[in-house]
Amino acid sequence: MDEKLYNLDSLYKLLNQDAEEVQEMVHMFIEIAPATLSEMEEAYDEENFEELGKLAHKFKGNLRLLNIHSLEDTILNLEKYSKENRNLDEIKRLMDKLETTLPKVIEQLKANELQNAERSK
């Protein structure tokens, strides 16, 4: 099996081990993440780096909440370089990584966390 790209331990701790609440947060992330990625791709394609930086900043909180460590540095650097409107080659590399990794994270969350919720009902 592939390496787990997230860790929900801190979310469980934050929510007092309430599995239902954790599942709700996971479900919300799965719903909003593709739309956020789409908005970021659009801003990148339009070379609107200020907007890309804002979107990265907003998305950073969601990634931290689910401890998606596989994208932590990516989103931090994407925010930084976009807001500074510099290192455009690196911005492209970071966007490529986000576009490749985020769908894998979502698939893992669907396969692991949401299936676990179904089994516990």
Image (spheres, rainbow, N blue to C red):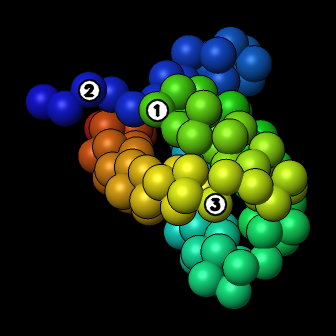
User: For numbered disc 3, what is the local secondary structure?
Assistant: helix
| Residue tagged 1 | 70
Residue 2, above or below 39: above
Residue 4, above or below 36: above
Q: Is residue 29 left or right of residue 108?
A: right
Image marks 2 and 1: residues in contact by CB distance under 8 Å: yes
User: For numbered disc 1, what is the local secondary structure?
Assistant: helix
Q: Position of residue 97 (x, y in %)?
A: 43, 51
> How busy is the neighbourhood of tag 3: few (under 14 within 10 Å), some, or many (20 plus)?
some
Circle number at residue 3: 2
Label 3 and label 2: CA atoms lie apart by: 29 Å
Nearer the N terminus, badge 1 or badge 3?
1
Q: Amino acid under label 1?
A: Ser
Q: Nearer the viewer, mark 1 or mark 3?
A: 3
Q: Position of residue 55 (x, y in %)?
A: 78, 62
Label 2 and label 1: CA atoms lie apart by: 10 Å
Choose top left, top right, bottom left or bottom right for residue 32.
bottom right
Residue 33 visible from this viewpoint: no
| Residue tagged 3 | 88
> How busy is the neighbourhood of tag 1: few (under 14 within 10 Å), some, or many (20 plus)?
some
Nearer the N terminus, badge 2 or badge 1?
2
Q: Amino acid under label 2?
A: Glu
